[in-house]
Amino acid sequence: MIKIAVLPGDGTGPEVVDEGLKVLNAVAQKTGIKYETQRYDFGGERYKKTGEILPDSAVEELRKFDAIYLGAIGHPDVKPGILEKGILLRLRFELDQYINLRPVKLYPGVETPLKDKGPDEIDFVVVRENTEGLYAGSGGTLKKGTLDEVAIQTSINTRKGVERCLRYAFEFTRKRNKDNTLTLCGKTNVLTFAFDLWERTFYEIGNKDYPDIKKDYAHVDATCMWMVKNPEWFDVIVTDNMFGDIITDLGAMIQGGMGIAAGGNINPEGVSMFEPIGGSAPKYTGKNVINPMAAISALQMMLFVLGEEKASDIAEKAIINVLSTKLKSLQAGKMGYSTTEVGDLICEEIAKA
Ligand code: IPM
Ligand code: MN
């Protein structure tokens, strides 16, 4: 029995999560997977009503699940940072989900803003470190609000944190077995402390334990350039938390937009959390127009990481079929179908499989 905690969250989160769960149900009927879900209402509305963001007891409860399925965090009435830090980042940190896995894959029939690039060229995976770097929350202010104000935000990089992320990326590259190339994305020419650690560890463990994997390096600014100009050069990219955040928004755009981009916050030894990368999209909330594909892809990734590869495969084929034969656009309100209809289309494909 797979136990899944569901956190629909804010804005359009609940709508897209419902479609993902519909798909899970369809896949389970097809494959015989047994699962149960439990919903938690953490998010902006609950915070406004009760002042509670995420109780300690909830974090402990969530540890006991096999996976967490998250919709979106962020509410227009709540100051930016409170919910993001209090729910999303807190769960990533406390559940030690040290990998953020973000595939950048252009499916057939999906429009990309990159001229002359198609599914053969846009197919790589970003492995983002997910618990350290600038996100660790180290820093502070002095003389706040005065002309002498000082603000410091420190990037924390530990040997252990860097090494476990790099090892995951090397193993992932090997398992993916596409070009067997892992690119370290950094900034060794300026961030000479942090990326010195990353680079040394990369070659040290890479040469010793992953001689079969080709090791490549690119600065983060050049990575952005190549992602647009020659995305086909990438197989797997590994990078720190902040750079990973930034380049995966660019990645989302070249794979067709926020409507399709999914990510997994992974603790290989613990409980992982899967989410569409896009935000809570307040202006589309409750209109049945948001694209649920990213949430459905996140669900498919969850099945894969849980080891349900057949189910994941069936779901991905359904996603590909619906994308290439049905949806007019991936943008909210322009799909040619409503949110719930897109979920239904996927379920129909799964039933046919
Ligand atoms: C993401 C988001 C989050 C991040 C925000 C909402 C805190 O942008 O998942 O990429 O910066 O990690
Ligand atoms: Mn982001």
Image: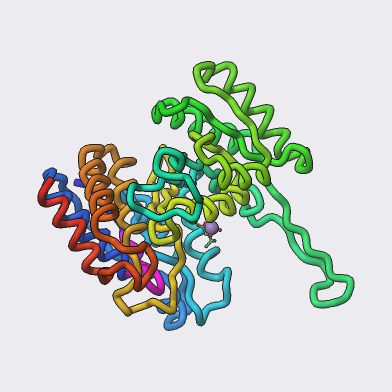
**Magenta segment: does it hold 8?**
yes
Please say which color scheme the image uses.
Answer: rainbow
Please tell me whether residue 338 is drawn above or below residue 129 in the rendered image. Answer: below
Q: In this view, does 226 lie above or below 350?
A: above
Left-right relation of 259 to 96: left
Residue positioned 85% across, 77% down in the render: 146
- Tell whether position 51 is magenta: no
- Counting from the top left corner in percent of width and height, residue 260 is at 38, 56
> Measured from the top left, where is residue 205 in percent x and y?
59, 22
Residue 129 left/right relative to 286: right
Task: State the image coordinates of residue 283 (x, y, percent, origin top left).
Answer: 43, 79
348 w.r.t. 121: above or below: below
Q: Nearer the viewer, residue 327 or 304?
A: 327
- Is any part of residue 103 visible from this angle? no
335 vs 31: above or below = below
Residue lying at 55% horizontally and 40% vertically, measured from the top left: 230
Among the 4 quarters of the image, the one containing residue 151: bottom right
Front-most of residues 319 and 280: 319
Query: In front: 91, or 239?
Result: 239
Instruction: Say how many tags the image has.
Output: 0
Residue 31 lies in quadrant? top left
Q: Which residue occupies the extreme front position in the image?
A: 116
Q: Quadrant of the C terminus?
A: top left
Q: Is residue 255 visible?
A: yes
Q: Give the range drawn in magenta.
A: 6-14
- Between 339 and 328, which is closer to the camera in this rendering? 328
Please tell me which residue is depicted at 16% across the width and 52% down the height of the picture. Answer: 349
Q: Position of residue 134 (x, y in %)?
A: 66, 52
Q: In this view, does 252 lie to the left or right of 13?
A: right
